[in-house]
Image: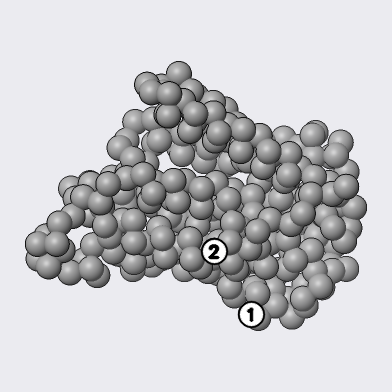
Amino acid sequence: MSAPPASPEQGSGRSTHFVSEIKRAASSTQVEISAEESAEVSPHKRDLVAILIKENEDIWKELLDNRFCRAMKEAANDDLNVLRGFEWYMMQDYYYVANLIDYEAARVPKARTVDEHASVMKRVADSVRYTDHFFKTVTAAQPTGLGISASAVLRTKLSEVLKNYIKLITSTAENENEVLSLVVTIAGLQSYYAIASDLYRYSAHHDTLWYKFWAKDNFGLGKACLVQQKFFIDNYKSWKDDKEKITKLFRETCKAELDLWNEALQNSA
């Protein structure tokens, strides 16, 4: 039996990780701005997501308007070039998800209480379950899955871009505070929702694999994007003095997302 499709609120592939991270942080991180401070610093000046997008409009627009996503918007299911590129992209996304098992497991020795240990172990188990779920979605026969052979998925080489992206996310999580470590999720989550919204509303064809397994799933990320936005507004004090570092991280992650789409285009030929 094939795995059910991902919940619309959870996205698919690595966006599932971004949603999980921001929801965990939003539920466990204490809000660090008082009512008095909130009155002194208006919400739009604390809205890190909006600030980063506005101040880095050049790379943000380039990411949203990448050539491969434009091709997906126009292509029909029988467009073999787009299909090859999309399959490559989803196989890379599987390996991102699979690498999260190590990412979560590395937190186990850091647990200092029984509750922390239980929480971390649950995240490891959830990561294992979702990796298996995503593998089945990628390999299940159409129309319930993408229909890529399991052997093709398991033989896929990890893109150097994705390797470096994973290293960046992991090292930031290890070396920065809880709030700054989540800056690396902004470009991925917000761009997935923006691109998926465009594909969901304006795709020429609604029966394609990329519409069903990517656009529809990630169109449901709107609520998570708002949670992410509010998280940084509420935790203004934890990032306000690190704007230069944050901008660098945002541009690096935008570039990684863009490069992965461009590699999908290269692999579509």
Check the image and name the residue furthest to the top. Answer: 109
Residue at label 1? 201
Residue 167 x/y as whole percent: 49, 33
Above or below 45: residue 13: above
Residue 205 quadrant: bottom right
Residue at label 2? 221
Above or below 57: residue 11: above
Q: How is the image coloured?
A: one colour
| In the foreground, 121 or 198 | 121
Q: Amino acid at mark 2?
A: Leu
Q: What number is the disc on residue 62?
A: none
Residue 177 x/y as whole percent: 30, 37
Residue 16 in view: yes
Residue 263 x/y as whole percent: 65, 51
How many marks on residues? Answer: 2
* Label 1 environment density (alpha carbons within 10 Å; few <14, some 14–19, many ≥20): few
Decide if residue 240 is on the left or right side of residue 205: left
Decide if residue 43 is on the left or right side of residue 6: left
Q: Kindly report the distance in space between the C-alpha atoms of the residues bearing marks 2 and 1.
A: 14 Å
* Label 2 environment density (alpha carbons within 10 Å; few <14, some 14–19, many ≥20): many
Above or below 215: residue 87: above
Residue beneath the point at 49% across and 29% down: 118
Residue 110 x/y as whole percent: 41, 22
Q: Earlier in the sequence, mark 2 or mark 1?
A: 1
